[in-house]
Image (tube, helix red, strand yellow):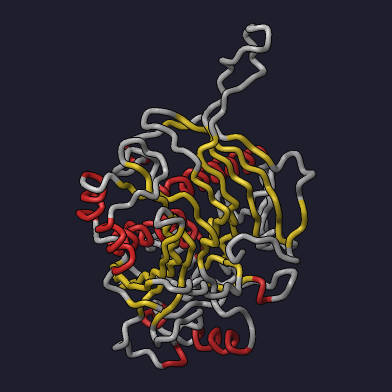
Amino acid sequence: SSSSSSSSNYKNNNNDASSTFTSPETMVYIEDTDAYGVMYNSNYLRAYERALFTFSIDNDNSNDDGNENSDNEPRTVVGGVVSLSRGGWSLVGATHQKFKASPPLGGSFVITGRLVDRSADGWSEVWDMVMTSPATATSTNDDNEYDDSIKDIVVYNSAMVTIVANGGASTRTNEQQTATILSPAPIPYLEELPESITCEHQFILQRDEFDAGMSTILSEHQHHEDGTPLRSITSSPYVPIRNVLNFFERSRSDFLGGPDMLRRMQTEGKIVWVVIRIDDCCLIGGSGGGDGDDKMTNQVEGANKGELDKIQHSAARDAGGGSDAYSNRYQCHPGQNVLVETNAKTSRRNMLFECRQTLYALEDSSSSLSSSLKHPCDRGDDEGKVRIAQAIITIMALDADTRRPTSNIPDWIVDILEGHDGNRV
C-alpha cells in the first residue's frame, strides 16, 4: 500500500525484543467521543501517536548519556523510535486500520506497539499498533476455579502506522532555514472507482489545525543571522494526519447531506454511519531529488521572507535508496483554502460506502511569485492545486437501535447515496 508498506530500504527488526511496548491504561473522556457516543475515528490515530510519543521520550530519558549528537544524524533510542530530539518525528501514514469496537465513555484502554520495519538509514519506521481493553483476570478454568492467567481482552482497533523523523537542516544558521518533515515518496494517486460519484468541498485551514508538536521543533532549528535561536515561530506549516481525517469526515458528512441529514437518517431512517476501515492514509511528499530541486534550493537562497512563506525549502537527506526515498512536504498556512475531493461508491446492497478522499491545498492564483518559485511538490491537474494527503475510508450502515450492520436502507437514503449532487465518473 502507498502509506506504510515495506520497501527495499527497510530492514526487519522483529527479533528486537526491546522494540515493543504497552502503554499505561488511558481513560476515555468526552473529548474523545463523537455524536454517537463512541470514540471518534481520527482519535485512534491520536491515541497511537501519544503512545509512541510517550514511549519515545521515556526511552530517550533512560538512554540519555549526556552526549550531544553532533553529526545531526537521527538518534535511535531504546526501542527504535526515530528521534532527532525527544519526540522528534511525525506520524505520516496509516493503513489496514480496522475499527472493531469502541472503548466506552468513562472506560479505558491500553495500546501495544511492535516495531515491524525500519529504513536502512533509521529515518523511518513502521509500527503495528493495537488498542485493547485492559486485561482483566475474571475468568475461570475448566474446574470452575479462578485463573488469573486467563485474561478477558476486547480488541478495539488496530493499524500499521509509519513515523518519519522531522528533518531540520540544522547546519544552516540564518532565518531563511525551514524545518521540514520527511515523508515517503512517490505516492500514486488513488484510482477512481467505477460507476461512482465524485464531489468536492472547500474548507479554510484554522490556526489550531496545524501540528502543535512541530512548533517547538521549528523554533529549535531556526536561527537569526548571529546564530541565536529564533523563538518567534508560534505555529507549524504542517497539517497532522489526524486533522486530515477531520477534513475527510466533514467532506463525507456534506456528501451525505450535512449534519442535519445525518441526524434525520438516525431519527427517521434508523440508520447511522460509522467508519470501519481506513487504508492507504498518508501525507504526500514532494517531487524527490534531482536537478529541479537543486534549482529550487538556489532560488531559495536569495528569496526574501515573503517568498519563503511560499516556498518549500529543500532539506531532504539522502536515504539508503537515494534521494527519492524521502521528499519534502508542502507547507500550508492558516487561512489557506483546502479542497477535499471525494470519490465514492456503495456496495453490499448499500450497506458499505467506500470513499476515496484526497486533500489539496489551493494556492492563491493572484500570488506575485513567478512560476519558477512555486512549490515543487506534487500537483493535481489544475495549476495551484497541491495534493497533500489521501486515504481510502470505508463506512458502514448500522441499525440506529441495535447498532448492528444492516442493508435495510430506506429508499430516500439510497437516493441520497446514489443521486448526490455530484458528477458521475
Q: Is residue 132 above or below residue 224?
A: above
Q: Position of residue 168 (x, y in %)?
A: 56, 66
Q: Is residue 337 left or right of residue 112?
A: left
Determine the image quadrant of residue 152: top right
Which residue corresponds to the image point at 31% horizontal and 74% vertical from the top-left? 422
- In depth, the one of 274 and 70 nearer the eye is 274
Regarding residue 63, the answer to whether it shows in the image is: yes
Q: Position of residue 256 (x, y in %)?
A: 29, 60
Q: Position of residue 278 (x, y in %)?
A: 50, 55
Q: Position of residue 286 (x, y in %)?
A: 54, 76
Regarding residue 359, the answer to whether it shows in the image is: no
Q: Is residue 210 left or right of residue 23?
A: left
- What count of labels does the image hold? 0
Split into 4 quadrants, where in the image is the N terminus? bottom right
Farthest residue to the right: give it.
15
Which residue corresponds to the image point at 72% horizontal and 39% vertical from the top-left? 18
Split into 4 quadrants, where in the image is the C terminus? bottom left
Determine the image quadrant of residue 60: top right
- In depth, the one of 57 and 383 nearer the eye is 383
Which residue corresponds to the image point at 33% horizontal and 72% vertical from the top-left? 199
Q: Is residue 407 left or right of residue 145?
A: left
Which residue corresponds to the image point at 64% horizontal and 54% vertical from the top-left? 126
- In depth, the one of 296 and 281 nearer the eye is 281
